[in-house]
Image: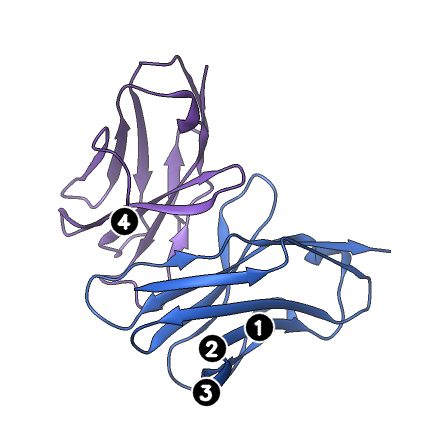
Amino acid sequence: AQSVTQLGSHVSVSEGALVLLRCNYSSSVPPYLFWYVQYPNQGLQLLLKYTSAATLVKGINGFEAEFKKSETSFHLTKPSAHMSDAAEYFCAVRLNSGYSTLTFGKGTMLLVSP
Amino acid sequence: EAGVTQSPTHLIKTRGQQATLRCSPISGHTSVYWYQQALGLGLQFLLWYDEGEERNRGNFPPRFSGRQFPNYSSELNVNALELEDSALYLCASSPSTGAHGYTFGSGTRLTVV
């Protein structure tokens, strides 16, 4: 079984500030982990993924995430927020086995103020 | 390269009717996934098709069904529509098992009145 918990349904930052979106997972076997972004009235776009290679993963638009097995976490960060980063972000987990599918967290809305 | 395409973009149905949603995957992708995104409930997994077979099913009643065609396109059928079926339905595709993530379409907004 697998599950994902995203802490904070809304996160507000100022433009230029650090972005930190938290994700903790539960998985019975080694997981694959993903971050997706959803802009209003659109589908989900893959930001980055961890598939058991390097634990620090760099994605698009300056985002990165670090897989920490001891903390069962996969937090998303960006050093400096931009107004265009305002969107909803979803963390997802997939078991590295069989007929597993992506299980998503409930999402975190990132608000960026000038 | 064309992405995942879904049709229609919007659909309005009356309670008790049937709705049919369609999805065309990225060329070369054999797997298609359906998710429901209802307000406040996040993304809920509905169905996974690969090579024409149903591989996995989420915790939804049988009135949610679908199929995958030989060209790997897929349709989702929702029978006996209920008001709570109103949601954004997202289709995604991947090569085979999708271990490296899915590519999503823009969704079909279903409104049941």
Of residues A113 and A21, the one drawn nearer to the viewer in this rendering: A21
**Secondary structure state at the residue bearing disc 4:** strand
| Lower position in the chain sequence, tag 2 or tag 3 | 3
Q: Are discs 1 and 3 both within one chain?
A: yes
Which one of the lettered chains is coloured blue? A
Label 3 belongs to which residue? Answer: A54
- Residue at 13%, 43% (x, y): give it: B70
Give the Cα separation between the discs numbered 4 and 1.
Answer: 28 Å
Q: Which residue is mark 4?
A: B32
Give the drawing colour for chain B: purple
User: What colour-coding does the image apply?
Assistant: by chain
Q: Is residue B28 left or right of residue A69?
A: left
Question: Is residue A63 in sight in this rendering?
Answer: no
Instruction: Where is residue B110? Give x, y as percent.
Output: 43, 26
Give me the chain letter of mark 1. Answer: A
* Same chain, labels 2 and 4: no
Q: Residue A81: x, y in percent?
A: 75, 65
